[in-house]
Image (spheres, grey):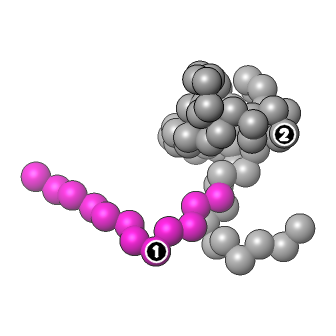
Amino acid sequence: MKLSTRNQLEGSIISITRGEAMAVVRVRLTGGDVVVSSVTADAVDDLELTDGKPVKVLIKATQVSLGVE
C-alpha cells in the first residue's frame, strides 16, 4: 500500500484501554518514545490490535503546535 502520509513511525503496541466507543492505544516507537492514539473500538477489532503487535503510526496534520516556557 502506498500512502501520501510522510510521517510514518514504526513501533509496537504497549497497551490498549477500551471504552464503550473509543480506545486509547499506546505505542512504543523504535527509538523508545511513546505515542498515544485515540481510535474507535471498532478499529481495534478490525485491525486486530493487541499488546505487542508491531504497527506503523501515521501522522498527517495541517497544523502542529509547539510550546516553550
Q: Residues within 10 Å of mark 1 (few under 14, many from 20)?
A: few
The x, y position of residue 62, in whole percent, is: 46, 74
Q: Position of residue 12 (x, y in %)?
A: 71, 36
Can you name the residue that lies furthest to the front here?
Answer: 20
Identity, as a three-letter code, of the amino acid under mark 1:
Thr
In the image, 21: left or right of 50? left
**Dominant SS type (magenta):** loop
Pick whichever of labels 2 and 1 is earlier in the sequence. Answer: 2
Q: Relative to residue 30, is residue 69 depicted above or below?
A: below
Measured from the top left, where is residue 66 in percent x and y? 28, 61
CB under 8 Å between callouts 2 and 1?
no
Q: Quadrant of the N terminus?
A: bottom right
Q: Nearer the viewer, residue 33 or 36?
A: 36
The residue singled out by tag 1 in the image is 62
- On screen, residue 67 versus residue 27, left or right, reads left
Label of residue 46 in the image: 2
Residue 53 seen anywhere in this rendered image of the structure:
no
Q: Is residue 35 visible?
A: yes
Q: Nearer the viewer, mark 2 or mark 1?
A: 2
Q: Residue drawn at (56%, 42%), measured in percent from left and top?
A: 37
Q: Residue type at mark 2?
A: Asp
Q: Is residue 1 above or below residue 20?
A: below
Residue 35 colored magenta? no
The residue under the point 65% across, 58% down is 58
Left or right of residue 63, residue 1 in this image: right
Specify the segment rendered in magenta.
Answer: 58-69
Count of all numbered marks drawn on residues in the image: 2
User: Which numbered marker is on residue 10?
Assistant: none
Q: Is residue 64 magenta?
A: yes
Q: Secondary structure at mark 2?
A: helix
